[in-house]
Image (cartoon, grey):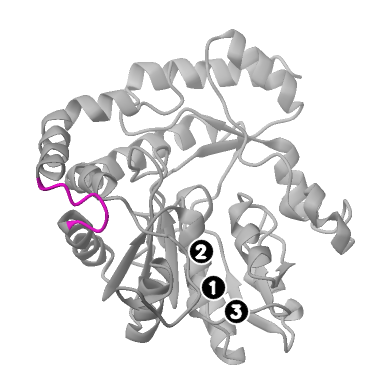
Amino acid sequence: MEFIDLKSQQNRIHSSIQKNINTVLTHGQYIMGPEVTELETKLAQYVGTKYCISNANGTDALLLALMALGIKPGDEVLTTPFSFFATTEVISLIGARPVFCDINPDTYNIDPQLMEAKITAKTKAIIPVSLYGQCADFDTINSIAQKYKIPVIEDAAQSFGATYKGRLSCNLSDISCTSFFPSKPLGCYGDGGACFTNNEELAQKMRIFRTHGQLKRYYHTEIGINGRLDTLQAAILLAKLEIFPDEVTKRSEIGARYKKYLGEKLKTQQLESHSTSVYAQFTIEVNQRDQFIQKLNALKIPTAVHYPIPLHLQPVYQKDGYKPGDFIHSENAANRVVSLPMHPYLDTQTQDQIISAVLECVGSQH
């Protein structure tokens, strides 16, 4: 059994992927070819923003957003401790300091009720993460941000295709960043990412920073990075984007079915009534996780843990004086979460097999 089945998807769109790749091989514009511009136009249309700036990966997307906002050493950026390392890595790379705010234990997203107490004169950006495929509480986050005149960057690496109050993820804040890592809801066959904004000045800055700070060829107005998306990956994403709305529907149905059969016995991520999720992961909480995973693996059910160590307890941040107990909800989740197989091609029979195995393993723990 596959944790994420990319083969079934590839079989479905094999001919269009092949055609798109062959077109690139024929024209030979492997860097910033026409497919890159076409993809940016279609992605912006999909989420409803004015601008999409494709780039090399989701980490670069976050880095470009911070660079465009002028975040500098000594600044503070407010974010969640329960996320993938890239969320804070970029803050630290730029010389700024990540300031953590705990999660809501039901949604696993940053708790806006705790945010205001963390804001100081040094707070120059807020990065909420739309974890596991559900958007954070953006109305509350944005209203706090506007009060203090702080820009908001959505880390939408897992939520591309999700909606919040009828609006799509990546069109909910000043800048949004997503990832096209192969396992993401919309993934390429390598690394890829994108930034979205409705602000022309920010879009222009991100384009310049993406290409070595270059305003025009060999004319550098900024210190930038090499953050471009390969044309071949853009060609693959164009083929995948055609079937993406259908895959989002399938993800929603599979996620709802998991919740129906597991939700009464186990804690799952609470889906807000005004939101839809793309279920980048379907995650449950269990006691004695290692034992649970061993039992499931023995039944040939693959699992993953997103994420076992919260960011404030990562070795590299110990110099900042964080300790266990500082962000109790994030720590509790990190000790208990486990993700189950989740992809649009998970058939009912296989899902039933997973559900009964999970219930059997949970039952045997008591």
Secondary structure character of the magenta stretch overall: loop
How far across and how far down the image is residue 289, in percent? Answer: 72, 27
Q: Which residue lies under the disc numbered 2? A: 62
Query: What whole-number distance in Å separates the C-alpha atoms at marks 1 and 2?
Result: 6 Å
Query: What whole-number distance in Å separates the C-alpha atoms at marks 1 and 3?
Result: 5 Å
Q: Do the residues labelled 1 and 3 touch (CB within 8 Å)?
A: yes
In the structure shown, which secondary structural element does the residue marked by tag 2 occupy?
Answer: helix
Q: Can residue 107 be seen in this view?
A: no
Disc 2 packing (10 Å; few <14; some 14–19; many ≥20): many
* 213 to the left or right of 232: right
Q: Is residue 332 visible?
A: yes
Q: Tell me which amino acid carries mark 3.
A: Ile
Q: Give the range drawn in magenta.
A: 27-33
Asked which quadrant contains residue 15, the reply is top left
Residue most extreme to the top: 298
Q: Tell me which amino acid carries mark 2.
A: Leu
Query: What whole-number distance in Å separates the C-alpha atoms at marks 2 and 3?
Result: 12 Å
Which numbered disc covers residue 132? none
In the rendered image, residue 94 lying in the magenta stretch gets the answer no
Q: Nearer the viewer, residue 159 or 313?
A: 313
Q: Tell me which amino acid carries mark 1.
A: Leu
How far across and how far down the image is residue 312, in percent? Answer: 77, 56
In the rendered image, residue 31 lying in the magenta stretch gets the answer yes
Q: Which residue lies under the disc numbered 1? A: 66
Asked which quadrant contains residue 162, the reply is bottom left
Q: Which residue lies under the disc numbered 3? A: 71
Q: Which residue is drawn at 27% across and 43% down?
A: 249
Q: Residue at x 39, y 38 (%)?
A: 182
Q: Which of marks 1 and 3 is nearer the N terminus?
A: 1
Q: Are marks 1 and 2 in contact (CB under 8 Å)?
A: yes
